[in-house]
Amino acid sequence: MRLDHHQRYLVEEFAADYLARRMSRRDLLRRALQVTGSVPLTASVLFALGCGGSEPEATPTPTTAPPTPAPTATPAGRVAEDDPAITAETVRFPGLAGELIAYRARPRADGVYPGVVVIHENRGLVDHIKDVARRYAKEGFVAVAVDLASRGGGTGGGGSPTGRNTEENRADLLAYTAYLKGLPFVRAGALGATGFCFGGGMTWELVVNSPDIRAAAPYYGTAASAFGRFADVRAAMLVVYGGADTRITSERQQVEDGLRAAGKTYEIKVYDGAGHAFFNDTGGAYDAAAAADAWQATLAWLRRHLAG
């Protein structure tokens, strides 16, 4: 048995969190097993990643703790569910293998708007991703934030936050895209996609398999789905990296070479000093300046390439 690139990416990420003491051993084993589906494979992969022994040693506590920085507001501004300019709700609709769950946000005013598929990190459809969907609605988009745990009952309902496997995730993402495309308040021919971390990789998976996505912005996700398939990309690509996120940003040259050789419309933005997950304002890697610039760049990109 072997892992595909998405599975490998996830297990490597879980291992990094465990070694940095951001994840317990129990959670590491549970989540890795959800990805691999095999106890022997989980054990061998984790051993190869340096997670086969005892718990990692605690980082010594400094004698003088550094001051806790004051919280910084999200540059784009969090958007409340009851914001009068938008309407937001959980929706359910039939997929190929059962009910799919999503969080849909759109402008309250009548009209047709460009649509965007929002793909979550490896924690599933959490409040932060719902807030990102509302931010898009506030900016004049219809956003559908997917829940790739739907086949197992949804995020928080027993399903794996990263879905059961890449094949099923791909099929569900195409179903979410079809759902968005069919909404009467979504402008025809104006569909975009964005995703973060695991969702960034799934954004690449979507754009090489759906001709309906016209513009996309994957944030620090592996582009392995597109290697050898850049000719299949129909979307204008804004590829966002953190400069300090070397595991993912190391793909940058291969991505640029592939998009250029295929004659695609693209821009690559690398934020020096920013790490993985720098856009997530609920996590420790949040970089306010990088997140602010990336948000404005993404809005401008989607508006330019989804203009009606």
Image (tube, rainbow, N blue to C red):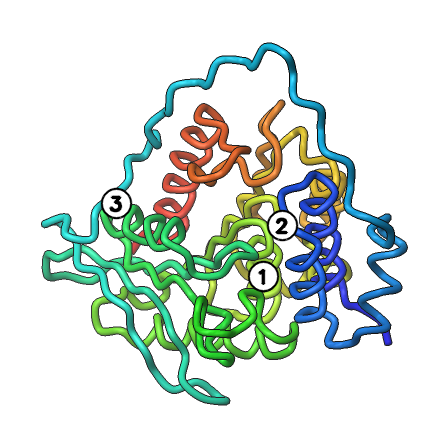
Q: Who's the residue at 64% across and 49% down the image?
A: 23
Q: Who's the residue at 42% across and 73% down the image?
A: 176
Indicate the quadrant containing the N terminus: top left, top right, bottom left or bottom right.
Answer: bottom right
What mark, if any, has residue 202 been given in the picture? 1
Q: Position of residue 275 (x, y in %)?
A: 61, 32
101 over 263 or under it: above or below? below
246 over 83 or under it: above or below? above
- What's the amino acid at mark 2? Gly
73 over 112 or under it: above or below? above
Which of the two marks, 3 or 1, is nearer to us in this view?
Answer: 1
Q: Who's the residue at 61% across and 38% down the image?
A: 276
Q: Image check: 265 left or right of 192?
A: right
Instruction: Determine crowd level at label 3: few under 14, some 14-19, many 20+ residues with C-alpha closer than 10 A.
Output: some
- What's the amino acid at mark 3? Glu
Query: Residue 292 or 21: which is nearer the viewer?
Result: 21
Q: Which of marks 3 and 1 is nearer the N terminus?
A: 3
Q: Where is residue 43 in the image (x, y as percent from the top left)?
A: 84, 65
What mark, if any, has residue 217 been given in the picture? none
Number of numbered callouts drawn: 3
Per the image, the residue denoted by label 2 is 221
Q: Where is residue 231 in the image (x, y as percent from the top left)?
A: 68, 61
Per the image, the residue denoted by label 3 is 139
Q: Earlier in the sequence, mark 2 or mark 3?
A: 3
Query: Residue 120 or 30: which is nearer the viewer?
Result: 30
Residues at circles 2 and 1 in contact by the CB criterion of under 8 Å: yes
Secondary structure found at label 2: loop
